[in-house]
Image (cartoon, rainbow, N blue to C red):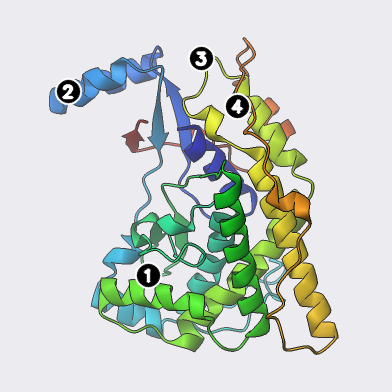
Amino acid sequence: MASQLFASTITSWIGLRSAKVRLLDTHTDEFRSLYTRMKRIFPLAANKLSRRAYVLVQEFIPGTALKHVHHVDLEKWIRGKAAAPAPGSGAEGSALSNSSSLMKQSCYAMGHLSALDALFYYDGDRLPIVTQTKGNGGNIILSPDEFKICAIDNGANFINNDRRAKIYFEECRKVFRQFLSSPNTPAKQMEMVRTMMLRYTGWRVPDEEFLLPIQRGFLSGAKEIVEEFGDNSRIQRLLVIMQKVDPPIPGLGSLNLRFISSMLDLFRSALSEGKENSFSNSSDSSSGANANDDNDELASKPSATTDVANHKNEAELKKADGKGGGASGVRETTTTATTTTT
């Protein structure tokens, strides 16, 4: 539960569309009303929920999951024309501002999302770029007609074992090396994404319209993440607020800031090396990134001690946000439609 709140909040902070989630205390009138309605339809589930301190309420997102794209929608997606960016929107100078393809636009956004998933060791449950699993297209929703992406069922997984962490760090470095050294050719890691789409749709996705925008979006997203979160203090403030919620949020102890700090350092060093290589016109990226040894040493995960205080006001989260805006995974009150528990 804490993982979903944490990841969904940070996803919204970097401007990606994400299903809003919020905690619902089971001692509130809102939950009692929900419980009464659920008991008529799912009595066993309702009784189970009533024994928990919280339930997690998630926004309903209209659209089609990537894994369920129908061939008619696929044809619209391929042939669709994206609207020109509005003057003054800030998108005029983006890498895809002149693109006429809806598919390129949405795939570029999926690349941004994949960079965040890599940071949270979560891409195995979406686009399988770093972890090279089968992937899960069910966690990306395409909006009707415009095919804009929305991330659902967000999560943050962390590796607390040094040996496994080192393996994952090296796989991430390989992705950056491949992407930076072959900007106009899909890297080998993208073949798992092609395989995933072939399994879902029977369609072998094209390089230029599908794989390369994801690859380029990944690098752009990694750069934005480094610029947005820098020294990790903003993320740390979010965790502090979550730790002060009483009763404690289930799963809070799994959120490992040391892992995130190591990944941010890796992103920064990999992007810096790629920039240096481009200046020197070197095409040999096989030597790899020599990240600081400290990146490979993980201390034990942080304590999930909880102050006996209840910080459930919007002003507190806006202070943690540092920008006074953005959706809050901890406190979002938008109308929602689905409920999950952990």
Relative depth, front residue between 25 and 227: 227
The residues tagged by marks 3 and 4 sit, at their Cα atoms, a distance apart of: 11 Å
The residues tagged by marks 4 and 1 sit, at their Cα atoms, a distance apart of: 37 Å
User: How far across and down, in percent of the image, does residue 70 sit?
Assistant: 25, 72
Q: Toward which corner of the image does residue 174 lie, by quadrant?
A: bottom right
* Residue 44 numbered mark, or none: 2
**In this rendering, does residue 322 appear at all?**
no
The residues tagged by marks 2 and 4 sit, at their Cα atoms, a distance apart of: 30 Å
Asked if residue 27 is positioned above or below residue 303 in the image, the reply reads above
User: How far across and down, in percent of the image, does residue 340 sit?
Assistant: 34, 34
* Crowding near the residue tagged with mark 3, few <14, some 14–19, many ≥20 C-alpha atoms within 10 Å: some
Q: Toward which corner of the image does residue 128 lie, by quadrant?
A: bottom left
Residue at 43% from the left image edge and 78% from the top image edge? 191
* Crowding near the residue tagged with mark 2, few <14, some 14–19, many ≥20 C-alpha atoms within 10 Å: few
Which residue is identified by label 3? 247
User: How far across and down, in percent of the image, does residue 143 sit?
Assistant: 39, 62
**In this rendering, does residue 168 appear at all?**
yes
